[in-house]
Image (spheres, helix red, strand yellow):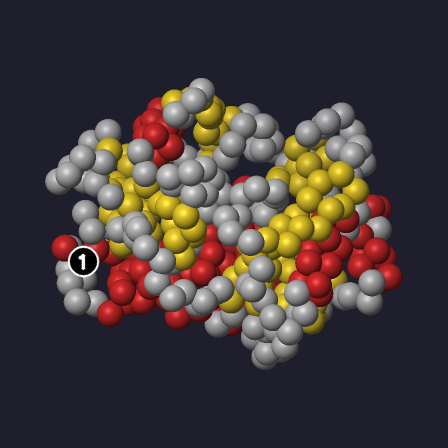
């Protein structure tokens, strides 16, 4: 589902949406890049973003927040701190020291890999996966697989922005996982 | 300066933070005792203490920007920024930030690397705190300081969870004070992952 289903949330969502910036043709022609850095420059909007997630999850007995490198590292930890959950970074290959498990996933051209520390989560953990944006859902599915392989239950995936045309929500649904987002991607570059 | 020598002597939170950090020998290469903060992040109390100590230190210093160095600075910087009402500015590896950036190169053991910041993220005269998980040679933090100073900001302090003075007794980097919670450990305590 999306947020914005009650009045006060709607005002906060509107502020969050206005704080985002669109950069056309980055990283390549045809892509309208949804830039969250301008949201981080707006303390109220950034706080509202975190608060909306915290309000949703604080009574859901979430024991782990897994954040996807690198922008998931910005949104995940404040949520984890507020709800008293562990924070687990999911990283590109060879960044995590010690023993890791790896999950490969397909990109438009080629493949990439996400890693998690062995022992970071165990069976019985209820996990929320956080990233700034969901596009095709490929990275989030790899994240889900990592957590489930370690025995955790993935309760939901949470992103600030969704790009609906890329059908990430459907991909997650086919794995039986719900998605919660605050806003949809925008087309018009802001000034 | 170490937190313990600066008002936090005997504070049990410092020991809890140090104990929660895991040492991984010979990573990323032989001879390096890697200070792994991921185990700190698995300990909600110790992670909370870490953020609280920084927030207590900086909340009344009129800091308008917290700049975090990619990627582990992204974990500690935003909670501090949120608590003190400051902007958060990510300092990133090349070609990650969209739009117009300024770049600062710095020297590695072999070769160079580069840190980037968005043009317009920080205005002249703003007071800035730079945050990273660890300071080693100070090369990355020095590049971060140079980036912020190039746009006319004043870097008030650099804050790291783990570090050592660059030279014994010298807690300044390019003239900017360095504040560190714990020193690197050489051994590994019985730290569960």
Q: Residue at x 24, y 29 (%)?
A: B174
Q: Is residue B153 left or right of residue B90?
A: left
Q: Is residue B135 above or below residue A155?
A: above
Q: Residue A51, percent across and down?
A: 54, 65
Q: Is residue B16 left or right of residue B30?
A: left
How packed mark 1 is, by other alpha carbons closer than 10 Å (few <14, some 14-19, many 20 or more), is: some
Q: Residue at x 78, y 34 (%)?
A: A110
Q: Is residue B89 left or right of residue B134?
A: right
Residue at disc 1, secondary structure: helix
Q: Residue B70, percent across and down?
A: 48, 40
Q: Residue A97, percent across and down?
A: 50, 48
Q: Is residue B24 left or right of residue B175?
A: right
- Chain at tag 1: B
Of the pair B182 and B147, the residue shown nearer to us: B182
Number of marks drawn: 1
Residue A107 shows up from this direction: yes
Q: Quadrant of residue A179?
A: bottom right
Q: Quadrant of residue B85?
A: bottom left
Q: Residue at x 68, y 58 (%)?
A: A146
Q: Which residue is mark 1?
A: B4
Q: Residue at x 21, y 41 (%)?
A: B165
Q: Is residue B189 above or below residue A96?
A: below
Residue B74 shows up from this direction: no
Q: Residue B6, percent across and down?
A: 15, 55
Q: Quadrant of residue B18?
A: bottom left
């Amino acid at each position: 589902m999306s947020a914005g289903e009650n009045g006060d949330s709607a005002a906060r969502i509107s502020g969050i949406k206005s704080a985002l910036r669109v950069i056309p043709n980055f990283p390549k022609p045809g892509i309208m890049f949804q830039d969250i850095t301008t949201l981080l420059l707006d303390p109220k909007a950034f706080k509202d973003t975190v608060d909306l997630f915290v309000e949703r999850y604080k009574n859901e007995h979430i024991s782990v927040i897994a954040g996807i490198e690198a922008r998931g590292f910005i949104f995940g930890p404040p949520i984890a701190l507020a709800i008293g959950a562990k924070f687990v970074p999911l990283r590109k290959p060879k960044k995590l020291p010690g023993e890791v498990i790896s999950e490969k996933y397909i990109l438009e051209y080629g493949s990439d890999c996400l890693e998690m520390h062995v022992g970071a989560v165990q069976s019985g953990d209820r996990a929320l996966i956080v990233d700034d944006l969901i596009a095709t859902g490929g990275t989030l599915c790899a994240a889900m697989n990592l957590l489930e392989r370690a025995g955790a239950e993935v309760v939901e995936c949470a992103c600030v922005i969704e790009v609906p045309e890329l059908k990430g929500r459907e991909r997650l649904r086919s794995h039986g996982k719900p998605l919660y987002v605050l806003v949809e991607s925008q087309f018009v570059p802001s000034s | 300066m170490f937190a313990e020598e600066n008002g936090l002597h005997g504070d049990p939170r410092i020991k809890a933070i140090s104990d929660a950090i895991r040492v991984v020998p010979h990573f990323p290469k032989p001879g390096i005792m890697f200070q792994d903060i991921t185990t700190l992040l698995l300990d909600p109390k110790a992670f909370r203490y870490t953020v609280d100590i920084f927030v207590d230190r900086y909340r009344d210093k009129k800091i308008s920007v917290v700049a975090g160095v990619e990627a582990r600075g992204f974990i500690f910087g935003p909670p501090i920024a949120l608590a003190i009402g400051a902007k958060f500015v990510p300092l990133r590896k090349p070609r990650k930030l969209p739009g117009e950036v300024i770049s600062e190169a710095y020297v590695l053991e072999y070769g160079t690397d580069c840190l980037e910041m968005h043009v317009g993220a920080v205005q002249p005269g703003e007071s800035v705190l730079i945050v990273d998980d660890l300071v080693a040679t100070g090369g990355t933090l020095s590049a971060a300081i140079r980036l912020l100073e190039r746009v006319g900001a004043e870097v008030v302090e650099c804050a790291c969870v783990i570090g050592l003075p660059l030279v014994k007794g010298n807690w300044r980097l390019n003239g900017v004070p360095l504040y560190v919670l714990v020193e690197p450990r050489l051994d590994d305590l019985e730290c569960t992952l």
